[in-house]
Amino acid sequence: MASQVLPARGNIGPTSTSTSTSTASPPLNLPSSMPDSLSQSSPSDALLHLSLQSQSNALRLAQELSQSLAVDNNNKTKNNNVSRSSSPIRSKNQKQKQKQQFYPIDLPPILNQRAKQQQLQQKQKQKQSSSLSSSYHHHYKNADDPLQTSKACTESILTSLTKVATGGSVASTSLRNLERQRRLTDLAANDLSQAITLRKSSNAASDALGAQLYGDAARAVAEYQNVNASQRAEVIAGPHAVRAHGRTVDVLQRTVLERFENAVQNSDLKELSNLTPLLGLLNMAEKGVGLYLKFAQENLSSVMNAGMAQDEEVENVQAMEKAEVESGVRISRAEAKRREGKEVVTACTKLAKIYNAAVTFLRHHLPMVAYSLGNADGDAALVQLIHAEVERRAAEVIRQYIVVKKLTKLSTRSIGVANAIEEKYLSGDGLQYDRQDLFDAAAASGANGTGSAEDKKSMLELMDDCGFKTDLGTFVQVNASLDELALLLQHTESYERFIRHAVDEVNKARKLRKEQMDKERKMKWMQDLENEGKDVTVEEAAKFDKEMKEIDKNKRVQDVLPLQTQLSDIVVETGGYYSGIERTFLLGSLQRALQSVSISDDRSFCPITILPPNRRPNAAGCNALQTSVVEECLYAAQRSTLRAFATGQCNTASAASNFCADILGRFLLEVLVHRADSGTSMLKPGDGLLPGQGGLGQTALAVMSSAQKGLSKATSKGLMVGSTEFEERELMRQRIEEGIAMSCAKLNDLEVAVDYTMRLERKLLQEVSTTFPPGKKETEQLNSCIKSLTGVQESFQSASNEAIDHLASTLMPRVRSIVNESVGQDNVATTGFMGGGTVPGTSVRMNYHLDDEAYEMAQLSEGYISRLCQSLDELVNPLRSHLAPRLSDNLILGVIAGASKRLEGAIKRSQFTPLGALALDSDIRYFVNFVKERFDSPNLSSSVTLYKACNPLARLVQISLLMNVDDLEDVLDLISSSKRKQMWDISLSDAKAFLNLRVDFEGRKVNELLQISD
């Protein structure tokens, strides 16, 4: 073998012995085994030659085996030809089978004996037989003996299966031997590859260390250590490679560690950045973590100490400047301007510097530490160190702020102020000016002109504020303190979110490292089994899983940071102080808004803002007003709640949302209800601003007297010269109309509060979606707190409905008197001031006992129904134009319901002829059309919707239908068809009573016809 020549690379054919220099490679000392190939100059070529030689030997052995089998088969064929030389056809077939290298299976003995018997019995027939065998010839020619044939076939099949099984067993053994040889060959090749890698890595590490390329040396060492080499691979690599690797690792670790310690002492960040990744490669992560934490603590402390020293210097300068101002030292304007532009050191600025230093350090160093020292939990240790330093310094600053600002005492006093404000307004004592502001302030503004903002501010300062200013300070001071406190909480929450995000990233990195480590352990386990020649069985896998669980159990991973820290505890305490003061500030803001609106001026009222655009000039609510109290109160609630949201803390935001919902749904609701009641009392006909049966009420007369005084003062001052009685009367009418508008504005405030509360809820929910992290339990809790405003909105809606029902009930005595006057039950003459004129008491009465002549006169003359509609217009129109559209529609429904009930009572006292029934139908139709024209909602223009909304009016229509039946037989059809449509509300007893009013219907027949139960 040593004399052979190695073929050229890429030539797969047999080796050539040619001496031609153009095609042959230079002669080599060819190895006899794979270990010897390592000593050659080209190990790869030597291994290739060994592989080609093994392939040629396998091919040669296969050819020799095939030839040996062919010789044995030829000898067997010759023996058969000698015994059967009389058959030329059989000799020809045997030659063809030899040519095809076909080896048949011998027939069993019983078939051979059966063939001999047939040959003796039928010698003549045997000569004519073809190349078929004796067994098949017997089968086709002797079908009369099936038992013998079946037994012969069975034995033949059994013999064939036995031979097949024997051959399969031999083949399986051969395959197993070949598989074992393949595995051994693969193991040998793998060991050889590992040995080459070990030797290359060892040499590369030594060379890089000699050249002081520590990074290349560390990577070569890591590559050497990552090789899961077997013992034979290490033997093949040679002891010199193993020794060289050991020396390189020892020298490299000492050198890198020494340089790393020097970099830590010198705070050389560049050197640390170069050396830190090498610690993980050299299995020195645990030593590196301690040194890196020492560097981190020194570096971070120096940065924070420098910031604190700078803040102390600025604070000293500020204290000196403040002392100069208090002592009366005069300074120039330029100096004052310069001092105003200087940065002021507060607790928020101190916390900002501490948090920014920590965040900046973590952003720069945590990724490198996690990559290089993560296997030793260096990233978790770094986060813990930074947070401990921040927590110590930030907690000290916050505690000092609580002491300096006296938040504990301030919070206690704020609770007392809040309770005093609630007690004052919930009892109604704070609304003592609501009745006065309707005409006194109007008269004052008419006489003196518009009040200035300074006068109003001075009046507000004189009002009782329940100790807000004395206990807490002015509004500006408390608002500034709350802004500063919210900013402090916001800075802390921003840092908390960042540090929690860093902890989440560290936990993710831990999980990835564990998965990678488990994967490497499993690969090593499988490779060890393969090196030992074992297969992966269920028992081995269960054993490996048990070992892995034991390792995980012994190595418990601690949390990076606990859920509750010292910093979070003190922040919760500070948030509690903030929430209590914020609640008191919100109540104080509402108190200030209520006091401001009690001093009525042009700024206290404005056109209602909840109307849709492009409305008709004379539509309902065209002159509607609203007070500033709802807008100011809802703005104060929004400001306080959004300021709490700006802190970023879900607990603080949830507390602020609950306070907002409680104050609006309990405090503001009660105040608005009190104001609505006072406005309703001002609109009471006869006693208030609306005229009653006896003329104008006391409130209207007081307004007229105030207007007269203001007019007299203006005339005496020369402001109005040559005023006439008409002008005086017009001024009085204008004052009364302003009073009505101001009273209606108090009812409109409840309707405005419904809309504003809905807007506030949408605004807060939108703010939550953009400020707080979605999907968390705290965020969902905050959303639930905000959605409690839906209940507040429903409370305002219910209070608004009750207020308008109260107003309708207040108007009801006047409505009943109008109906009585119109139908002729009361013979009273009234004079109207608001455009009413004189209504004589001798007008046409309700009369439906009509003959032909009376019916014609009724059609030509003005009936009672037109006077009724006119009088209702005079009563409702001032309210309709000054109430919100929905409130106006509800009021009209209430007024029409009362008028319809009164009309029904008047109808029961009348007698009807057939022509009178027609007149009733005409009057009811006129009344229904009049009602439809007064509604603003398009839904109420439909008769079906109107009848469902106003049942008394629907009864009038049903009475008209009942009274206009031509025959009593049609009554039952009318009632049944109307009931099927759910449009019948008259009982049978009432139907009998109304039908008995028809003079042409006999009472006996009516009673007999309606003898059925409801």
Image (cartoon, helix red, strand yellow):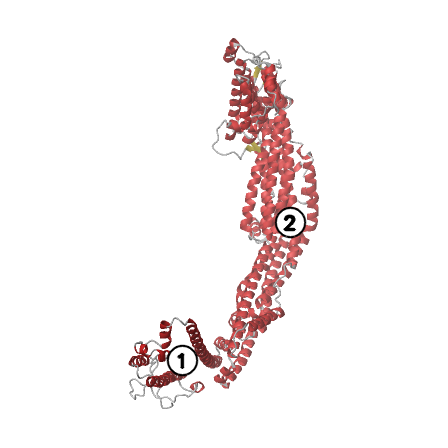
Of 15 and 421, nearer the camera is 15
Q: Position of residue 913 (x, y in %)?
A: 55, 13
Which quarter of the figure is the N terminus placed in? Answer: bottom left
The single residue placed furthest to the top in the displayed view is: 853
Of 573 and 827, which appears nearest the observer?
Answer: 827
Looking at the image, the residue that sits furthest to the front is 121
Q: Is residue 99 above or below residue 953?
A: below
Quadrant (top left/top right/bottom left/bottom right) for the C terminus: top right
Question: Which mark sits nearer the N-terminus, 1 or 2?
Answer: 1
Kind of residue at badge 2: Tyr
Residue 824 appears at what percent x and percent y? 60, 14
In-image side of 641 versus 418 (left or right): left
The kind of secondary structure element at disc 2 is helix
Measured as percent of width and height from the top left, residue 247 is found at: 53, 83
As drawn, is 1008 to the left or to the right of 526? right
Q: Amino acid at mark 1?
A: Gln
241, above or below 389, in the image: below
**Numbered mark located on residue 233 in the image:** none
At label 2, counting other C-alpha atoms closer than 10 Å, the crowd grade (few under 14, some 14-19, many 20 or more) is many
- Name which quarter of the figure residue 142 lies in: bottom left
User: Badge 1, how many Cα within 10 Å: few under 14, some, many 20+?
Assistant: few
Residue occupied by mark 2: 578
Provide the residue designation for mark 1: 113
Query: Along the line of sight, which residue is nearer the eye, 621 or 268?
Result: 621
354 versus 759 height, above or below = below
Choose between 640 and 1002: the one closer to the eye: 1002
Label 1 secondary element: helix
**Cα distance between the residues tagged 1 and 2:** 116 Å
The quarter of the displayed image where residue 863 is located: top right
Residue 157 in percent (x, y) is at 43, 74
Image depth: mark 1 or mark 2 in front: 1
